[in-house]
Amino acid sequence: NGTEDAFHEDARVLMCSTFQHPYYPYCGADSSNEHILNVPLPALTDSRGFRAAIERVWMPALDAFKPQAVFVSAGFDAHREDPLAYLNLEDEDYAWVTERIREVADAHAGGGIVSTLEGGYNINALGRCVVEHLKVLSR
């Protein structure tokens, strides 16, 4: 929510996110801005649903936007083992989405990616997913 609030009025920034919806109060799927692409996912969304949403919404928008830099708020709480939400992503999904983000950065931003850890509350799943994320970033 903080990232969306910070850039809500700044069309120089394209923000793409996924999250379980409905879940948190006062968190809506509609940002009312073309440059903020919220992709709400229903509870129990799995790899197939997550990947389809990324391909359908994020990728065309990112390629059209041609970002000069890519910043990632890497949240891992959509993992099936995480106790916070009710999404069913696997370790491999995080490697896959990182690869897709890397492709955008390579094509438009000279490979520049800054990634910060945002969330993940099952320490075992978090550790594995961060490793997958970092493996793709370090290639």
Image (cartoon, rainbow, N blue to C red):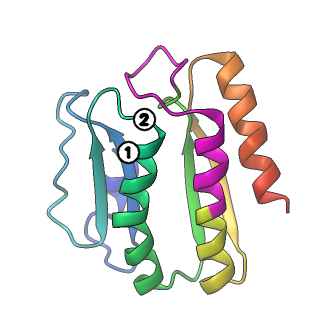
Residue under numbered circle 2: 46
Instruction: Give the image location of residue 68, x and y in percent.
Output: 57, 83
Q: Quadrant of residue 129?
A: top right
For image coordinates 36% across by 34% down, the residue present is 45
| Residue bounds of the magenta highlight | 80-99
Q: Residue furthest right?
A: 139
Give SS at disc 2. loop
Instruction: Give the image location of residue 92, x and y in percent.
Output: 65, 41
For image coordinates 46% across by 52% down, the residue present is 51
Disc 1 versus disc 2: distance between alpha carbons?
5 Å
Give SS at disc 1. helix
Q: Residues within 10 Å of mark 2 (few under 14, many from 20)?
A: some
Residue under numbered circle 1: 49
Tag 1: residue type?
Answer: Gly
**Mark 1 vs 2: CB contact within 8 A:** yes
Considering depth in this image, is 57 or 52 the residue closer to the camera? Answer: 52
